[in-house]
Image: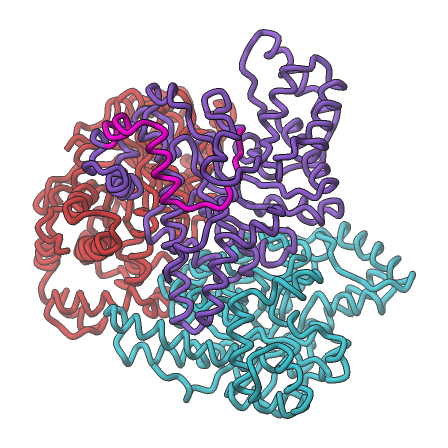
Chain colours: A cyan, B red, C purple
Amino acid sequence: MDLSAIPIVDQHAHNLLRPEHARGFAYPSAFTEGYAAEVVTRHAQETIFFRRSMREIAELLGCEPRLEAILEARERLGFEEVARRCFEAAGFEAILLDDGFMPDRVMPTHWHNRFARVRRLLRVEFLAEQLIAAFPTWTAFEEAFREALHQPDPEVIGFKSIVAYRTGLAIEPPDPEAARAAFQALRQQAERGERLRLAHKPLNDWVVWRTLEAAAHLGLPVQFHTGFGDPDLDLRWATPLHLRPLLEHPDFQRVPFVLLHASYPYTREAGYLAAVYPHVYVDLGLAIPFLSRSGMASVVRAFLEFTPLSKIMFSTDAHLIPELFYLGARWGRRILGEVLEETIRAGDLTVMEAEDAAEAILRRNARALYGL
Amino acid sequence: MDLSAIPIVDQHAHNLLRPEHARGFAYPSAFTEGYAAEVVTRHAQETIFFRRSMREIAELLGCEPRLEAILEARERLGFEEVARRCFEAAGFEAILLDDGFMPDRVMPTHWHNRFARVRRLLRVEFLAEQLIAAFPTWTAFEEAFREALHQPDPEVIGFKSIVAYRTGLAIEPPDPEAARAAFQALRQQAERGERLRLAHKPLNDWVVWRTLEAAAHLGLPVQFHTGFGDPDLDLRWATPLHLRPLLEHPDFQRVPFVLLHASYPYTREAGYLAAVYPHVYVDLGLAIPFLSRSGMASVVRAFLEFTPLSKIMFSTDAHLIPELFYLGARWGRRILGEVLEETIRAGDLTVMEAEDAAEAILRRNARALYGL
Amino acid sequence: MDLSAIPIVDQHAHNLLRPEHARGFAYPSAFTEGYAAEVVTRHAQETIFFRRSMREIAELLGCEPRLEAILEARERLGFEEVARRCFEAAGFEAILLDDGFMPDRVMPTHWHNRFARVRRLLRVEFLAEQLIAAFPTWTAFEEAFREALHQPDPEVIGFKSIVAYRTGLAIEPPDPEAARAAFQALRQQAERGERLRLAHKPLNDWVVWRTLEAAAHLGLPVQFHTGFGDPDLDLRWATPLHLRPLLEHPDFQRVPFVLLHASYPYTREAGYLAAVYPHVYVDLGLAIPFLSRSGMASVVRAFLEFTPLSKIMFSTDAHLIPELFYLGARWGRRILGEVLEETIRAGDLTVMEAEDAAEAILRRNARALYGL
């Protein structure tokens, strides 16, 4: 099934690295969730994803399928031309950018509008860190944070939480006293000029809770990092099943929860939640294109087992380099097309239903959810 | 491999809805584990299971494959004729009914004997709720509950627990004082005329423990809901791995534990338990027919990886509408036949072994276990 | 892809049973992780692994594919001839033996050198049990244990821990006081002449911690039993995700952690850890050959999804009977060859890359890690 005619809504990605920072950036590190030097310089180059991607990028850039040749071709073509080729080949209708990832080193969010309509996802932990640095008292911080959440930039169409990377998804009801104590500890760091890292469970949980309240008020979805990611993350606390108390909470019944990254390896668990809760959605980003072809297909199959077609969305989770947007879009269409063809052969869906499902997953569900 | 000649022992299902209640019942709700209005009226109709099933039901009823046409055909044919067609096409030798699901609105258990030999599974939480409503003191309740368990109706050939839906499978040794306190709280609700819901961990655990004692005494199996189900259930506490202390308990070594619903998504975990413990069995119900065809096949494959063929049983988990009996039986035979054919091609089983395995899984294992 | 030309480094196996003990040994018990009589004599003979293996062993021994015929053929050919056939057909370059499994009843480790170069894995729980029996005071034991770890026999090329079987993988920082108390309890057993079983969390955790310190000092890898095994083991505490605090610990960054048995059913979790941590490796033993063919293939596919090819190793986990070495090697090559062919067809790897991956997984990665 050829899905190349469907313009994709990439419902979760990140800004591109500024070209002046590209020199200090180890290209293979964009292809791994590891960050240790030995991973980046050696093992990450031994994954199927890396090997396959080198060939595909080389073809797009017109060079030999070796890392060095690709680095040379990128240099020769220049940042803008590489980006142009990648996005043109990718074919996006809209891109939702979480612009809180490496914010000091990336291109401005609006800059990406040249490739597709861009909207913002507000990364609430980054927002909180900025405001902790800016406001010396808890009262002032609390007010500023609430205001920032409740009156976001009009380009913001959803929130994003990386609490899975910090203190885990087993979020507890807010304890303002403990949150305030964590704030004080971070303020002391701020006053010593240290870089802040919000990883204090009572305060992280408070941040998520306030976010959900704002989302309920504004009618905006909240995206959660779930499942695999870099080793900052304790995978035991990254299964979306831990979100249950929030999913059951009466105040958050109208808040769409978007479970990112197919919650890999908790894909069936995520699909289950999206099947039984009206306000839970799942996403394919990172699992596509970071896995082997068989792995990408098995993730899509896992969702199709039990999850409504109206609850599955697509993203690339691309970050820093334009190639990941290209690879994500390419493999998203291709794997989805192949797996939907299987469902036709299995008698699970008619051709028309399968075509409609592709459109829903690649574009329509996200358009509807974010009001694009 | 055509398994249509094997009459199925459906080792776990539920009674049909009385026709007079069918009017108030949203037909799509039988095809989903969700119960929120938005799930039933919209998302549940977007699963592969729903789409595929509409086509298959329409074919059986002789109408167009649309929900409205099916509802019309059901009306036109009448309850008994629809049931007759479904059960005739299904081909059961025996059906084990847990008749504690929606007990006020379903047909009497013996009524189902027209379709196949029927035996009862005693749902112990429902039994406990009835007796709590009937007996004002802990002592009287305790005695009545013990008696009901130890001298059940002769049609009862096993117990069934839904503790996974209430307080989870991490069952602790009984604490009679705490159980009695929970009983008092429920009695107060009973005296206010409220509907009782047994969801008080010390009392639920006490109920399971007493059930296992009775099962040991009577030599009856105990079925446990495990894995996915409606959102009453916290999936974190529904993995059968939590049953370990009971499986290891010296008093319960002769009690067969039946893990229902392929423990989806904990299928390999369930299969592991059935492989290493002599008294653990697994079941395919709900996973068949509620999943995509690829999902159903992957569940069967997961069990065949490691679990003895003598430990796998089949059920439909059908409830309320006869169509689910038909779909369960149809897909049970079909998927099992296909996956067993794969094992022949793989050199894992001979043709004769695979045929024998089909017979064991669809009928023989349950016949032996329940003494049918 | 025919991998028969690659001599295997079997990076985890156990010694063969002495022929004089074979009489009292139930042959089917080598094919199951269960140990209850009813499992060994009945259900274990109903797995696909058992059925398939009987046929393959019968072919190798030249007899009919029935248990009794195989037992007769083994008797007729004799222990040495059966072993010779199995190892010759298997084709090992080297074998790493954990010789702490049933140490009283197996052949000496050096005896196995006739089949391939043999190196030892020091099972630290067995070592600790021996030294607890030998040394009456904590101080003397502590010194002896430390010395045994830091100055092992030159044939030792790694440590092996079975803490997953005893107190689980959620290892806590050592608490010397609590460890000493557990030591005293074991000493009392020793003085009563009882067989010691080290299953006292503070002491087991202390043992693992001291092992990791010695491994860091000596530059040796530590193998951990992870995932499925016999029912001694609580599978909830056998997921390698619990190792995270050790993996993150600054003192152990240079210690290679080898996660055995594909951590089944936590294979993707293990593969994730090996992808993001430079010092984590995974292994295919036990999953091959103990699963169905589809199961073995799905485990290999699961690793190839995300794990660097430089981090995957092969073992048989063979124990007691030579047939398991044969079956492990046979299926290791065959399944790996088939799955790698799939990656070629999928465009994930080139033919050359796939051939190189086979060599890496079956031999090169282990040679490099253990300095063979």
Q: Where is residue C254 in the image (x, y as percent from the top left)?
A: 71, 49
**Front-most of residues A17 and C54:** C54
**Does A170 appear above or below C110?**
below
Of residues C227 and C56, the one nearer the viewer is C56
Q: In which quarter of the image is residue B288?
A: bottom left
For this rendering, which residue is in front, A271 or A261?
A261
| Residue C76 in magenta stretch | yes
Asked if the stretch drawn in magenta spans residue C54, the answer is no
Residue placed furthest toward the top: C192
Looking at this view, is A172 or A63 the one in front? A63
What is the total number of numbered labels drawn onto the structure image? Answer: 0
In this view, A307 is above or below B187: below
Indicate the quadrant where residue A6 lies. bottom left
Q: Can residue A123 be seen in this view?
A: yes
Q: What stretch is highlighted in magenta?
A: C70-99
Q: Give above or below for A353 relative to C284.
A: below
Predominant secondary structure, magenta span: helix
The answer, for residue B38, to whether it is visible in the render is no
The location of residue A226, given as percent across then percent down, is 56, 61
Residue sitting at the far right: A192
Q: Is residue A104 left or right of residue A120?
A: right
Residue at left offset 22%, top offset 38%: C62
Q: Where is residue C353 in the image (x, y as percent from the top left)?
A: 49, 68
Residue C357 percent location from the top left of the image: 49, 61
Quarter that holds the N terminus of chain A: bottom left
Apparent side of residue B266 relative to residue C76 in the rendered image (left or right): right
> What residue is at 35 percent from the left and 62 percent from the top?
A305
